[in-house]
Amino acid sequence: MALLPGAARRLLCSLFLCLWLSTLARAATRRYEWEVSYQFKSPDCVRKLSATINGQTPGPTIRATQGDTVEVKVRNSLLTENLAIHWHGIRQIGTPWADGTEGVTQCPILPGDTLTYAFVVDRPGTYMYHAHYGMQRSAGLYGVVVVVVAAAPGAKADDAEPFAYDDEHHVLLNDWWHNSTYELAVGLASVPMVWVGEPHSLLINGRGRFNCSAAAVPGTCNATSPECDTPVFAVVPGQTYRFRIASVTSLSALNFEIEGHEMTVVEADGHYVKPFVVKNINIYSGETYSVLIKADQDPNRNYWLASNVVSRQPATPTGTAILSYSGDRAPPSTTPPTGPAWNDTMYRFQQSVATVAHPAYVEPPPPRADRTILLLNTQNKIDAHTKWALNGVSFTLPHTPYLVAMKRGLLDTFDQRPPPETYAYQGYDVYAPPQNPNATTSDGLYRLRFGSVVDVVLQNANMLAPNKSETHPWHLHGHDFWVLGYGIGRFDPAVHPASYNLKDPVLKNTVAVHPYGWTALRFKADNPGVWAFHCHIEAHFFMGMGIVFEEGIQRVASLPPEIMGCGETNGGHR
Ligand SMILES: *[C@@H]1O[C@H](CO)[C@@H](O)[C@H](O)[C@H]1NC(C)=O
Ligand SMILES: *[C@@H]1O[C@H](CO)[C@@H](O)[C@H](O)[C@H]1NC(C)=O
Ligand SMILES: *[C@@H]1O[C@H](CO)[C@@H](O)[C@H](O)[C@H]1NC(C)=O
Ligand SMILES: *[C@@H]1O[C@H](CO)[C@@H](O)[C@H](O)[C@H]1NC(C)=O
Ligand SMILES: *[C@@H]1O[C@H](CO)[C@@H](O)[C@H](O)[C@H]1NC(C)=O
Ligand SMILES: *[C@@H]1O[C@H](CO)[C@@H](O)[C@H](O)[C@H]1NC(C)=O
Ligand SMILES: [Cu+2]
């Protein structure tokens, strides 16, 4: 049964978008039927149990037009594992139950069960989907969502966009381990923590090439398997291509480059940006970008597409694909680009700062916030377990999803004490390991006044080990936020807000917090529902690096029974 697209429409109308929606040309319903199952795959030539959709990893690309309803009937055939799928970058206005976040907006889909996600894709752009249960994303369950502009009849599809191109390509970036997600998860939860180490491969569109002579288990690596054929991107001389790039990495911050071709960045997370030209682009897990490239180089040779690890000392070979003018699939004789120095934080910082709204598409933020939440990001210990915490509180998911619990008043299902709003920032040394490594756990959430303007400042700091601070890509569900500013060092609420960009900040759903740095963002709590906000590094969220916002719960339409069936959602016991 569908999750009420009709109700979604009515709610959209109540949010004054009615007029705009009704002007869109003939919104359609795009229907998909997906069976999710484990299959043996060899994405980097090494055979591994992978989570697939209709037998594929990455899963099928969803392509819809702005205003369409996307309906995906998901059957969980994983046999022994729960499932939930998140539609990353889709705000789910009026359909908060279709966000796909297990523990927050729904109970998991049990093995053998089917759930139909239905939601309106209200804004053009490049998005993605991926599993949001346990660490399942790293098993291969992800894909691309493309929403194209609803153009006037007879117009070219790209007429409504502030740039033109002849054709498009999709680049889905990932990192990949040969270890199972259970080895990853159990390792993280062990005392002492067992870290799986750097990824074995970097995948482009689900393919990489591991060096078979280094395979841990003999006989599992087949260098001639067609499943690890290097992807080839065909171009025609003189044409301009839009490359839609998405990163679903579990860990890695990446740098992506097309050998010999400059890129013009035009879109980030579904928003047009003031175009800027780069040799290579840094992309963090959960982000999407569109770049334009002109096929204007010597057509008699091929060129590398390359993804490289940045921000952590790399121990993973460059991920590669081939750009071909002639259709020839031969690897170029050159060495693939190795990207910028992995520890050049300022290079990445400056690219973040350069990303602002396109002048013709600026949506000015509200001039001031009603509430400011300061979040100190630290690595901690809880009973000797390694954790991540915000203001000393490490997040745990409740057993009853918040959306159901709050809608039904099941207030004994999670901690009613709100998590801390700030930390002792005065005198906090972000360059030193935490003085008290101990944190606490909580499944409490932040309740936001409906319609209020909320600032969040994410402060990065040193980890438990000295002289170490990582990049954290933070992703907000249900919203885009304005990126008001970035800094390196300790954020001072008396000083730094004066330098916020209130003129043309970009809207995004995922943003990097650089090593030892801070990132300030602003959003309007105007989307009724319960929304996760978390580090998109799979292991970090698993270790508690997230929070949850509730807003306008009383305005949420009645919940579809299909999202229930766990915790107290059935009136049962925990
Ligand atoms: C990952 O797999 C390798 C090879 O099988 C094994 O040696 C290692 O212990 C595994 N790591 C974890 C964290 O399980
Ligand atoms: C693969 O690994 C072997 C053994 O470690 C090494 O000798 C060889 O050079 C590697 N090949 C490539 C293409 O890196
Ligand atoms: C490797 O894969 C190729 C292509 O599928 C197949 O012909 C060959 O038998 C495989 N080699 C091994 C050792 O399994
Ligand atoms: C990066 O690390 C190298 C050593 O691996 C060091 O020489 C260099 O100074 C570092 N650069 C920065 C910007 O920290
Ligand atoms: C942190 O917790 C450990 C027990 O896990 C305890 O031994 C230690 O004293 C605590 N440290 C502080 C500073 O409270
Ligand atoms: C950490 O960096 C400081 C300088 O910022 C240096 O004095 C110290 O020796 C470093 N410690 C380690 C363990 O590398
Ligand atoms: Cu993180």
Image (tube, rainbow, N blue to C red):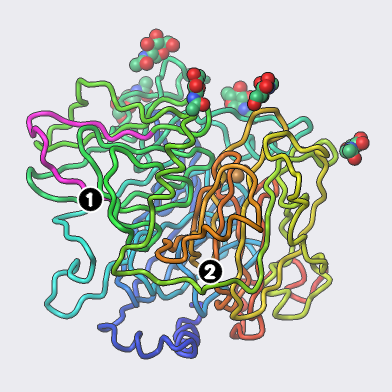
Q: Quadrant of residue 173?
A: top left
Compare marks 2 and 1 and give the one earlier in the sequence: 1
- The relative height of residue 210 versus residue 431 in the rendered view (above or below) is above
- On the image, the x and y values in percent for residue 59 come to 39, 52
- The relative height of residue 229 versus residue 412 in the rendered view (above or below) is above
Q: For the point 40% across and 45% down, which residue is it?
A: 351
Q: Quadrant of residue 237?
A: top left
Kindly identify the amino acid type of the residue bearing the numbered disc 2. Gly
- On the image, the x and y values in percent for residue 170 come to 29, 50
* Residue 321 visible in the current orientation: yes
Which residue is label 2 attached to?
478
Residue placed most toward the observer, 351 or 394: 351
Quadrant of the frame with the C terminus? bottom right
Query: Could you classify mark 2 by the number of other residues whose Cα lies within 10 Å: few (under 14), some (14-19), or many (20 or more)?
Result: many
Q: What stretch is highlighted in magenta?
A: 291-307
Q: Is residue 387 left or right of residue 499?
A: right
- On the image, the x and y values in percent for residue 426 come to 75, 49
Residue placed most toward the observer, 77 or 360: 360
Q: For the point 20% across and 20% down, which residue is it?
A: 333
Q: Is residue 293 left or right of residue 183?
A: left
The Cα atoms of the two marked residues, 2 and 1, are separated by 28 Å
Q: Which structural element holds mark 1?
A: strand
Residue placed most toward the observer, 336 or 422: 422
Kindly identify the amino acid type of the residue bearing the numbered disc 1. Leu
Quadrant position of ligand 5: top right
In the drawing, what numbered circle is on residue 292? 1
Q: Which structural element holds mark 2?
A: loop
Residue 102 belongs to the span the image colors magenta: no
Residue 295 belongs to the span the image colors magenta: yes
Q: In this view, does 229 lie to the left or right of 193?
A: left
Q: Are marks 2 and 1 in contact (CB under 8 Å)?
A: no
